[in-house]
Image (tube, helix red, strand yellow):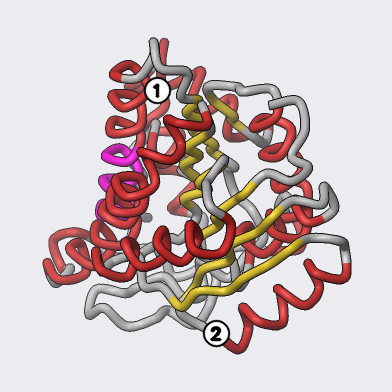
Amino acid sequence: MSSLSNKVIIITGASSGIGEACALDFASHQCKLVLAARSMDKLKAVAETCKARGAEVITVSCDVAKEEDCKHLVEESIRAFGTIHVLLNNAGISMRAVFEQTDLQVIRQVMDINFWGTVYCTKYALPYLLKEKGSVVGVSSIAGYKGLPGRTGYSASKFAMQGFLEALRTENMKKGLHVLIACPGYTASNIRNTALNKYGKSQSETPLDESKLMQPEEVADYIAQAVMKRKRTLILTTQGKLAVWLNKFFPAFTDKLVYKTIAKEPDSPFK
């Protein structure tokens, strides 16, 4: 896919963060966008900016944790544009709590959005993507390569997403389907503010200095280029690349390094 021009692209979680940045980046390629999220007010504002950049846009209210919403998302995409070239599974939620103290419903909620949301959307979009020899993109995390303390549910959901997408890639290797697993590393976004605590409530604060993190616009540009070049994986930030490499060859050492890094966060339970 040398160009995104006139391609039909679905983006979940498009109302903020990486999803919003991807919508704006892709819009500059004059593509056809299907923007999905739960917050329709924010989504419509993003859509207007995308239209101003030259894209055709529709918005769809969608909670990816609900299978029927994901089916409806694909149906609306086909009704509007007739096909699908790219599915960007971006909608996600995080959590921060020690597993021992965490209500299991928190784990279920994170899995429902991050893993099952990807499965549902991909299932219904796949026939059209196969016809177009299109792309399935999963916005994962370094936590999909290395389990992070205090993020058991989040890490589990990203490991599951990556396993699903790797298997999907291999199943369809002779059918022309492109599968990209994108792992941005720490990126400035609202995901840490909305991360669930042990009771399932939003944290409403971030343990990191967001101004020092990779910006979502930069991540979006990397993802767009990776889609056009049909890359298999995308690992971003020096810290992220180092963590993946170290964990491959020195897992025990990486355990200690990750523990120390998380322990430095404000109010960390790991001291």
| Above/below status of 158 relative to 246 | below
Residue 255 percent location from the top left of the image? 36, 31
Q: Amino acid at mark 2?
A: Met
In the picture, the disc for residue 40 is 2
| Above/below status of 173 relative to 56 | above
In front of the other: 98 or 193? 193
Residue 265 percent location from the top left of the image? 51, 60
Query: For the point 62% across and 49% down, which residue is it?
Result: 8
Q: Amino acid at mark 1?
A: Phe
- For mark 1, give the secondary structure: helix
In front of the other: 126 or 259? 126
Q: Is residue 194 left or right of residue 114?
A: right
Q: Is residue 207 visible?
A: no
Residue 173 percent location from the top left of the image? 39, 13
Residue 36 percent location from the top left of the image? 51, 68
The residue singled out by tag 1 in the image is 253
**What residue range appears in magenta?**
149-161
> Where is the N terminus found, in terms of image quarters?
top right
- For mark 2, give the secondary structure: helix
| Above/below status of 122 relative to 93 | above
Which numbered mark, 1 or 2, is in the foreground of this view? Answer: 2
| Above/below status of 241 relative to 207 | above
Residue 156 lies in the magenta-colored region: yes
Query: For the point 41% across and 70% down, which residue is it?
Result: 195
Q: Residues within 10 Å of mark 1 (few under 14, many from 20)?
A: few
Query: For the point 29% across and 19% down, which residue is it?
Result: 171
